[in-house]
Image: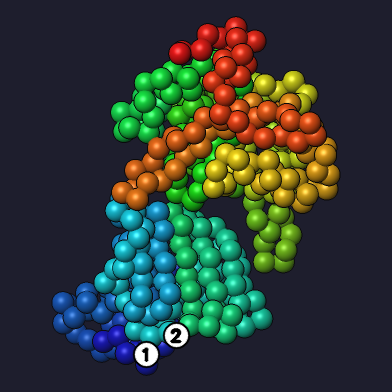
Amino acid sequence: MNSPDLVNRVRDRLAGSGAAITRAEVARAVREESGIAGHDDILVATDRMTQEFVGAGPLEPLLRADGTTDVLVTAPDQVWCDDDRGLRRTDVTFANEDAVRRLAQRLALACGRRLDDARPFVDAWLPGRVRLHAVLPPIAAGGTCISLRVLRPARHDLASLHALGTFDDTVHDTLRAIVEARLAFVVTGGTGAGKTSLLNALLGTVSPGERIVCVEDAAELAPTHPQFVRLVSRPPNVEGAGEVTLADLVKQGLRMRPDRLVVGEVRGAEVCHLLNALNTGHDGGAGTLHANSPAEVPARMEALAALGGLPRAALHSQLSAAFHVVLHMRRERDGTRRLTDVGVLDRAGDTVRVIHHRDRLKSLLAERGVAAPW
């Protein structure tokens, strides 16, 4: 019932109909092309064909499952899923390599992108907060690879993270003091470490009298705050036009009277505009940054600033005055996320380093009239 010949005939019929591809349209095409009369057989065939033509196909149930963060296809019989239990192989399979390639190309088309021999890879956003990355052979030597990252709105507040064991009582009070003192901070960590969740929770403690303007690649942050304004970037279309970058949005955000300017994830030349903003009276700014440890933050900032043409010396000069605190998140082997480091940026000669110095943090809080909770 799901032979390649039938799949091709159903595909041709759907393409020729001009109608939106829905489950009902798939069922109609299956009935007309297969000659199946039995109701149960039609349902079975429709389920299989719907996976072929609608949504993410056989990957759809994995994407919809609670807690899923990544779905990875490395071969027709190797589909992996990452969630709170860690990365594991699933029992989902594809009929063959062609089926994986067809899905990758269909998903790319849904993003408004090409994926073919001339452009054998794609990195784009699917409707429904899923990031697609796919690579075709021969670039992917073992066969078509699909990586789907599920972005879920960050909903935790500071109290719930505390209850989950992300940090202890003293750190909980310290985080509140950092926000109250309007110290600029950056949350660091690896992929899936909980950076966005912590940033979201901290923004939820900002005074309701302050206006937060946030720029993101995808709408992840959703703090409970009455004056939270979000700007979301936009990729170029098929013709390569219409792109709106994070750097563009940082500049626009500065014109929207922000009390706090936030970059959901600092990943490129926008760091130059953010540093300029935080050096011109915009206190309390924040963002997240991929880094394996707090000590790597200056070097990561150097690399990103170079994309915007900011020299190393200028970067260190601005960085020391722009950000005050580094909060480092780590994902443990058992899947739990913990805040493992609270560091302070310190100028040492011509360079900036991250140190763990409670007295220095205490002084920064005191300068802004906030008592340290220790």
Q: Residues within 10 Å of mark 2 (few under 14, many from 20)?
A: some
- Quarter of the image where the C terminus is located: top left
Q: Which residue is labeled 2 in the image?
A: 98
Identity of the amino acid at label 1?
Pro
Residue 51 picture quarter: bottom left
Tell which circle, 1 or 2, labels the residue nearer the N-terminal end. Answer: 1
- Residue 103 in sight: yes
Q: Verify CB contact (< 8 Å) between mark 1 and mark 2.
A: yes
Q: Which residue is labeled 1 in the image?
A: 4
- Quarter of the image where the N terminus is located: bottom left
**SS label for mark 1:** helix
Identity of the amino acid at label 2?
Asp
Report the side of 263 relative to 314 (left or right).
left
Residue 47 picture quarter: bottom left
Which residue corresponds to the image point at 29% horizontal and 68% vertical from the top-left? 90
Q: Is residue 238 above or below residue 202?
A: below
Which residue corresponds to the image point at 50% horizontal and 48% vertical from the top-left? 190
Which residue corresponds to the image point at 67% horizontal and 35% vertical from the top-left? 353
